[in-house]
Amino acid sequence: MTEKNIDDAPSLKQALTEEFEEIVDAPAQVGLSDEAIREITESLNAPENDDHIALVEDLSHADTADLLQKVSDDDRRALIEQNTSEIDPQTFSYMDPDLRKATLSQMDAKDVAEIISALDSDDALEIIENLDEDFQKQIIQQLSAKTRLVIEEGLTFPEDSAGRLMQREFVAIPQFWTVGKAIDYMRAAASELPSEFYDLIVIDPLYHVVGEIPLNRILRSKRSVKIEELTLDELHTIPAEMDQEEAAMIFRREGLNSAPVVDNDSRLIGVITFDDILNVIDEEAEEDIMKLAGIEGSGMYRSVLSTTASRFRWLFVNLMTAIAASIVISMFDATVEQIVALAVLMPIVASMGGNAGTQALTVAVRALATKELSSTNMVRVISKETIVGTLNGAGFAVIMGVIAAVWFTSPMLGGVIATAMIINLFFAGFFGAAIPIFLDRIGSDPALSSTVLLTTITDIVGFFAFLGLASIFLI
Amino acid sequence: MTEKNIDDAPSLKQALTEEFEEIVDAPAQVGLSDEAIREITESLNAPENDDHIALVEDLSHADTADLLQKVSDDDRRALIEQNTSEIDPQTFSYMDPDLRKATLSQMDAKDVAEIISALDSDDALEIIENLDEDFQKQIIQQLSAKTRLVIEEGLTFPEDSAGRLMQREFVAIPQFWTVGKAIDYMRAAASELPSEFYDLIVIDPLYHVVGEIPLNRILRSKRSVKIEELTLDELHTIPAEMDQEEAAMIFRREGLNSAPVVDNDSRLIGVITFDDILNVIDEEAEEDIMKLAGIEGSGMYRSVLSTTASRFRWLFVNLMTAIAASIVISMFDATVEQIVALAVLMPIVASMGGNAGTQALTVAVRALATKELSSTNMVRVISKETIVGTLNGAGFAVIMGVIAAVWFTSPMLGGVIATAMIINLFFAGFFGAAIPIFLDRIGSDPALSSTVLLTTITDIVGFFAFLGLASIFLI
């Protein structure tokens, strides 16, 4: 009987796992499903049930990261404590940086050092660079001399530079070799090669990059073909100091799979691969969208207090601009007191200006980020946005003019709001495009402060034009 | 003398080209510089000067696309007419879809058919799918039978599906082969293989995908090793009907270089590569950022009238919500008439609510897009945003309460605006997170209409709370 039970155990586990896999692999479901997460957390919180150990073991790195990100703080702590050996170090490179920092900071430096040591140099660096400096030092002390050297050197490169992104593991060969010799070398050194690589990097004796060869070019060539014959004409070396955004632009434009990274003496020191670049592109797109809304970082996994504080700053700037707009209104308080319809209608003019301006602004910010907008077409873009704004201003002048005239039985009031609408949407189009271009010119980040500057202008112009015209023509 | 002149010509051209290349390759410059563009357009517009022909010839595809995108409409037309043979068909796949459509629509169907025929099937399909249907038909008639079949079949897949993204050129081998046999095959078939490939796809006799092998695994293995031993455990086949956004998510999560695409019978019909995915990720990020601002498409290269019309629609919806807010104000017109300070201060409450809500909304929209937000953590995210909103509301209640009390020497007015601020930022946080989640649940696109719904709520709640409290406590 006992024996039978032992035999049964794995098949039971297997049945459980298979059923679970069906949930995990549900069709049209990318990532871990909510049902799978529920099953794991239920088991986690049932003292006598430790299915979750086996279930977590079966997840891919990305799915495990998903799991850790989506569960509550308590469940996450319990999962990590109970599944330490089942959670692969690679999982941490899939996690959101904020959450990863919070999670690792609760662990011993020694345990984190073990995680770091198990990763490729680029992933290791990405994890360590976000931690607090003191904790960084404690971890680095626990690393082997070799890993420590790589990490410390990596940290000398500027943040968000190619040097931080690259991995130090690559395959470089001299240009005088043949295809046959290169293949023999790779077979002999198989176990020392990086786990993945996509190009061979051709170097001279001083480690200067001479060229790159995509692997398919090696495979389709005869053994006798010289390496130098296969080398691509164009060389896409990336200086270690280059900003990651620039590097991503090069990858995107040239359709690169990987690119060699060189130091100041043009010597090969690492390789950036397309998966690093995918992360950069995601990050940059996220940054732009967040900055436009006045958010620092992704915000999803920050604590409530830290989130509140970071958003407070931007809202405070916004309060100042709202007060500025109020001061404009207060300049016309006598007029508003006489005609209360002005108070009713004035937010419409400001709001339409803000929205029309935001449209122009978003197009300009995005075009600057993708380098589609530069001094060549700058004037053309600003002109176009100004015309679009004015045309829409004219359209809404008619609509809103009629509505206001009928609502308050005052054709003159209709005329005033119509004129104010045209004026405000003209300025909205012009400044919507011009503000980000101007900020970019003076070296500021256009995504960061464009919105506040723009709404200040559209609020002030909107209230000033509407109330000013009213005080002239309606009193 | 004549002979000497002829000899001179190429070296002159070479000198010119070298100088130009220095401009093109200026450091820290990704993409074509404004100086290079100016040099080309100046030559283009000087009748006796045809340097631009040689200069354009030297540009990479991405740079030529940059050039065509940034110059004026007239210059673009002239460039294409005068440089027809220097502009590589591939250039068009680097261009913005709107601008490409406008450019190709001015050409003969025959010329466009030539461009299409010269491209890989995925690029060809991408270009043709955006053109008008009549023009599409004319072009397809001009294609060779083989290309026509590929294009027509490609067009049967849903828009933005994996089937539209994939290329039909791939390298598939049977699993019973050895590494040696695979290499021999690739050497023998070298000229028929796709120009680039990153993985071998292992198939059974019925063309079902059995596995994938990254090329580096082939290169590091001995000739005698069996193909089936090298096949990756995990299979990442993508159904042709899958949405490109889902496909991008899989690439990103699994760090894929390429993935096989299968039809409804699980047979291999194509391959998606990482460069297609880079485009998808860029497109999707752009779409989200544009939709949040109420813009259809990228907007950069649309004509003035078409841009005006597309933006008008969203502004019109916005006008309706602004009018709704005005109706709320008009409900309290007697109160405003008595205390004009209310008209001065009321935009502040609405504006702070709109901005705080947009912060919560942007985080939620982005987290839904990246699938970091689902039913597991939905309640937690909404609670967090509501708390953050309320805390910031309390902070700004104090600040704005004091300012209003001092400005209008009325502590009671300060109390009213403080209370209204807390109420509005509470709702802003709650609805900022809840609206996108709700829209996602009912199958709507959260990026598209969240902003309008949110500002409607924050405007109405803001005006209602502030003016309502004022009419109770200040009159």
Image (cartoon, coloured by chain):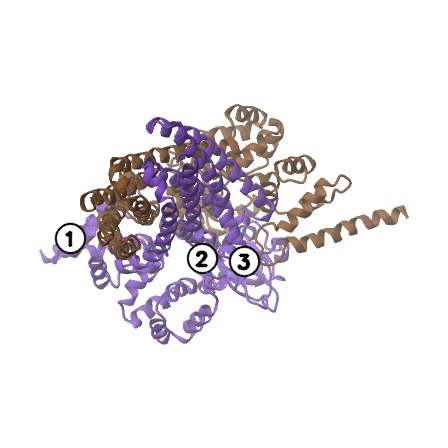
Chain colours: A purple, B brown
- Label 2 marks a residue whose chain is A
Amino acid carrying mark 1 in the image = Asp
Amino acid carrying mark 2 in the image = Glu
Q: Could you say where residue B234 lies in the image, as x and y percent from the top left?
A: 35, 49
- Which one is nearer the viewer's eye here, B108 or A416? A416
- Which one is nearer the viewer's eye here, B439 or B453? B453
Q: Which residue is mark 2?
A: A196
Q: Tag 1: Cα neighbours inside 10 Å, few (<14), some, or many (≥20)?
A: few
**CB-based contact (under 8 Å), mark 2 and mark 3:** no
As helix, strand or loop, the secondary structure at mark 2 comes to loop
Q: Which residue is at 10% across, 58% downward?
A: A2
Q: Which residue is at 51% across, 28% downward?
A: B149
Q: Which residue is mark 1?
A: A8
Among the two numbered marks 3 and 1 on one chain, the one whose residue lies closer to the N terminus: 1
Q: Tag 3: Cα neighbours inside 10 Å, few (<14), some, or many (≥20)?
A: many
- Label 1 marks a residue whose chain is A
- B347 in relation to A203, above or below: above
User: In this view of the protein, can residue A98 be seen by the observer?
Assistant: yes
**Disc 2 versus disc 3: distance between alpha carbons?**
12 Å
Q: Quadrant of residue B41?
A: top right
As helix, strand or loop, the secondary structure at mark 1 comes to helix
**Residue located farthest toward the right when viewing the structure as drawn:** B1
- Which one is nearer the viewer's eye here, B397 or B277? B397
Question: Looking at the picture, do discs 2 and 3 lie on one chain?
Answer: yes
Q: Quadrant of residue A98?
A: bottom left
Of marks 2 and 1, the one in the foreground: 2
Q: Which image quadrant: the C terminus of chain B?
A: top left
Q: Which residue is mark 3?
A: A200
- Which one is nearer the viewer's eye here, A207 or B415? B415
